[in-house]
Amino acid sequence: MDRRRFLAHAASLAAAAGPNPLWAALAFPGDVVSLQAALQDGRIDSSSLLVDTAFARADAIDLQGPRLNAIVERNPLARAIALAMDHERRQGRYRGPLHGIPVLLKDNIDTADDMLTTAGSLALAGHPARADATLVLRLRAAGAVVLGKTNLSEWANFRGARSVSGWSARGGQTRNPHVLDRSPSGSSSGSAVAVAAGLAPLAVGTETDGSLVTPASMCGVVAVKPTLGVVSRHGLVPIAHSQDSAGPMATCVADAALLLQAMAGADPADPATATPTAVAARRRLAGLRLDTGSLSGARLGVAREHFGVHPAADALAEAALATLRAAGAVLVDPVSVVADPAELGVAEFERLLHEFKADLNAYLARRGDTAAVKDLAGLIAFNRVHAVDEMPWFGQETFEAAQRRGGLGSAAYRRADATCRRLAWTQGLGAALRRHRLDAIVAPTTGPAYPIDPVGGDHWVGGSSQPAAVAGAPHVTVPMGTAFALPVGLSFYGAPGQDARLLQLAYAYERRAPPRPDPGFKATVMGLP
């Protein structure tokens, strides 16, 4: 299909779409496997057409119409890269399932091109980073076309006490495509929104605790937070080396698995990638086979401690549990996963504060003159000087608390780190998995999206991200339905290294779950049944 016929076809779809023409207009024709098949057999004649489609859809939905504000910057080289991938395909060179497929990157992932990497902050908005993040090098080698950067919660929601998910000084406020006055959650807000709204088939986000799985849940897409070290962290704007992971966002589990396989790899610049657990996880991912029968005989623990966030989410989860049972899963219900939630929360925050100071200072030193600040102290001072732009809604109490912490050799850090390891794994997730011989834990990811509130900040009421995040373990979320037109996800998380097993379980559930909801771009939930 050439460009003229494609756009004419898109216009006819829009005309026939009734009350929601934007969803049909310029939509991608299916998942990544379908896209690749269409490219291979000539039904879509070029990857460059996919780039044109993505940018046209972004014009119609992200910049105009609902004005989702998901993409903060477009890659001016995207079409040229796509043309190069088209040329390679014509010459008989095929790099794999991501050859010519558009991908968006969260704006805390370094790229050594014309695009900036800012973590949403004006302090990093001067010049592009000096080198590609390792995961970006791998995506380029796999033939993916980097479309641009997505907005995020500034500094990945690790700046102030009343932070607003999806807001950054650089990018403004990203909105949930299902109901526009609702939060997209964060911090990988733009990546989740872009995939949900069909601005790109794939996006990359990052997570320290919840920043992949909660926006995916609230926006109705799939996300994978991999085992620590499966994907290199080199070139990511950090929060904490004990928990930071980059991961895929997609409309289905199979696509998320393809993107994760492409990003995963060893990296001398990141020692976590060389751990036996990370190496084993990548080996299993390389041999991954997705099968609708994977739930048969699987032992799944139901973490009731993650229920109670919202009655509608609980009702959807109960229906999901019935689906899992019908597919042959053995449910152990209930299972306790967190030994002492309050103590773990305090220890985790203390560990993050120490690591943020050390890791950010090291990252800024590598950035050199591509950033306006050289360390955390300089960043705090920058924000004070630029408070009108940087802090119109909330402050930087978290930054200031981190700056007061000592080094990674301090007794306070060692104590917090040991407590996290004990409560999250030894007495927590690890103990539950061993005691009940479980393949995974299941629970609602979080509740329906809350309203965007720049004055009061996020109205966060809870979720299931913490155990896997603190333990460095994998976590997959899959849409399980909607409440009040707002999506809610079902979580599968388990032992470090078991990423492939979780993907199999999530895939088997997904094939039986309610259809993933298309965004309605509704102004508000008021008046909805």
Image (spheres, rainbow, N blue to C red):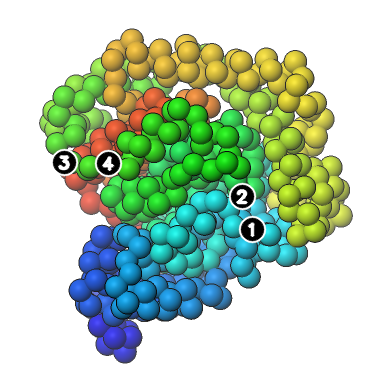
Q: Amino acid at mark 2?
A: Gly
Q: Is residue 355 above or below residue 56?
A: above
What is the spatial separation of the Cα atoms under label 1 and label 3, in whole angstroms? 41 Å
Indicate the secondary structure of the residue bearing disc 1.
loop
**Disc on res. 288:** 4
Query: Residue 508: percent from the left, percent from the top?
Result: 20, 40
Residue occupying image coordinates x 35% and y 37%: 283
* Residue holding disc 2: 235
Which comes sooner in the sequence, label 1 or label 2? 1
In front: label 4 or label 3: 4
Asked if the residues shown at circle 1 and circle 2 are in contact, with their CB atoms under 8 angstroms apart, the answer is yes
Which comes sooner in the sequence, label 2 or label 3? 2
Disc 3 crowd rating (10 Å Cα; few below 14, some 14-19, many 20+) is some
Which comes sooner in the sequence, label 4 or label 1? 1
Q: Is residue 351 above or below residue 259?
A: above
Check the picture and name the quadrant holding the N terminus. Answer: bottom left
* Residue holding disc 1: 131
In front: label 1 or label 3: 1
Q: How many marks?
A: 4
* Residue holding disc 3: 292
What is the spatial separation of the Cα atoms under label 2 and label 4, in whole angstroms? 27 Å
Q: Is residue 330 above or below residue 114?
A: above
What is the spatial separation of the Cα atoms under label 4 and label 3, in whole angstroms? 13 Å
Asked if the residues shown at circle 4 and circle 3 are in contact, with their CB atoms under 8 angstroms apart, the answer is no
Residue occupying image coordinates x 47% and y 11%: 427
